[in-house]
Image (cartoon, rainbow, N blue to C red):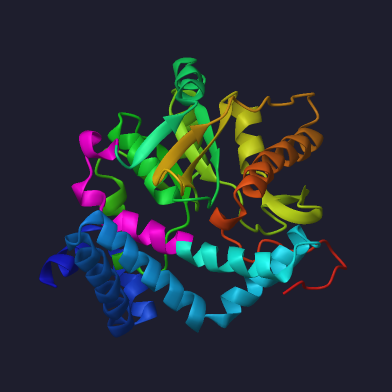
């Protein structure tokens, strides 16, 4: 525990202050649970770690009814004609997918370029490489689809490290633990707060920024776009950055192939950025295009998306709360 304490002091006063606000006991308890799961599952062979992850996912499905309710509400919005049996299958598989993701993350310390080939294969890598070689900078358009944590990690193992935008978790010890797992092959996370200057610098130097663009956003940070036929408040950040820097927006996501028992890291051609000179309209138009790209892949693989998230939480003025 002393090593952890030292790391807090090394990271500055912010972590220490956050721990004091959250409570020392709570902070270390959460960290202890996260550390134990990662390390204990990490000792297992991969297949057993995946089975353990599936068990955790099944347990979460059983004991977290509010998440099941969120998934039910979302599926009714997105697929109003879907029968109850199919909705129930997808809900269960959402938790199974999260369990698989947990199992894979625990294996990160064991992965290298040789054994990764048995776990992850590429589709459309040329789209990513061509965009990277353009020197214009690349915004990786992605979402909470499949094993999203493994996608960035696997890509870095193969020699393509990137920066990615994320919101830090409230527990600084858990955040540091996750960062150690993610950054082994050069990946770098950027906290959403106060990140604009750093992101622009990275893109203008020809670098890559990964952005998860499928979560609910506040009215102040997003625009409303059609998502499965219902307006959803969506981050305007990708469109804003693409217009400002000229970076290419490349869709990419890691999908589980159940039949082949392998993850497929799939990249698509860049999404054309519409630039008419009217910034407000261009941000709206481009954000809607990115949202449709994500919707299309979710439609093809509905049991691998995060339906438990309250995607339609922010409503247009005057509309009632969905959840």
Residue 12 visible: no
- Residue 100: name its quadrant: bottom left
Residue, far front: 259
- Residue 205: name its quadrant: top left
Quarter of the image that includes the N terminus: bottom left
Classify residue 175 as left or right of residue 123.
Answer: left
224 or 148, which lies in front? 148
Please tell me whether residue 240 is drawn above or below residue 221 in the rendered image.
Answer: above
- Residue 211: say if magenta: no
At 38% from the left edge and 79% from the top edge, which residue is drawn? Answer: 22
Horizontal and vertical percent position of residue 224: 77, 51
220 or 321, which lies in front? 321
258 or 163, which lies in front? 258
Horizontal and vertical percent position of residue 214: 61, 51
Horizontal and vertical percent position of residue 8: 23, 64
**Residues in magenta, as a range:** 97-117
Classify residue 298 as left or right of residue 285.
Answer: left
């Amino acid at each position: 525990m002393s090593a952890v304490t030292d790391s807090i002091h090394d990271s500055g006063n912010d972590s220490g202050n956050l721990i004091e606000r959250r409570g020392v006991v709570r902070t270390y308890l959460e960290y202890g649970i996260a550390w134990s799961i990662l390390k204990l599952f990490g000792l297992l062979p991969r297949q057993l770690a995946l089975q353990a992850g599936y068990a955790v996912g099944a347990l979460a499905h059983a004991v977290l009814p509010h998440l099941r309710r969120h998934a039910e509400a979302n599926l009714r919005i997105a697929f109003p004609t879907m029968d109850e049996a199919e909705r129930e299958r997808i809900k269960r598989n959402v938790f199974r997918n999260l369990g698989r993701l947990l199992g894979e993350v625990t294996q990160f310390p064991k992965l290298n370029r040789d054994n990764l080939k048995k776990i992850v294969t590429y589709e459309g890598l040329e789209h990513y490489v061509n965009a990277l070689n353009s020197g214009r900078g690349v915004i990786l358009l992605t979402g909470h689809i499949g094993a999203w944590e493994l996608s960035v990690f696997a890509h870095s193992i193969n020699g393509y490290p990137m920066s990615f935008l994320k919101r830090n978790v409230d527990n600084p010890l858990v955040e540091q633990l996750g960062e150690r797992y993610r950054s082994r092959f050069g990946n770098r996370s950027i906290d959403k707060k106060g990140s604009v200057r750093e992101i622009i610098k990275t893109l203008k130097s020809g670098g890559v920024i990964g952005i998860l663009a499928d979560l609910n956003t506040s009215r102040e940070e997003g625009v409303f776009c059609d998502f499965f036929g219902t307006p959803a408040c969506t981050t305007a950040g990708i469109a804003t950055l693409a217009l400002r820097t000229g970076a290419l927006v490349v869709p990419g996501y890691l999908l589980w192939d159940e039949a082949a028992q392998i993850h497929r890291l799939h990249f698509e051609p860049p999404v054309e950025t519409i630039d008419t000179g009217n910034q407000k309209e261009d941000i709206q138009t481009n954000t809607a295009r990115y949202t449709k790209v994500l919707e299309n892949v979710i439609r093809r693989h509905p049991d691998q998306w995060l339906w438990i998230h309250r995607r339609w939480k922010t409503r247009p003025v005057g509309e009632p709360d969905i959840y």
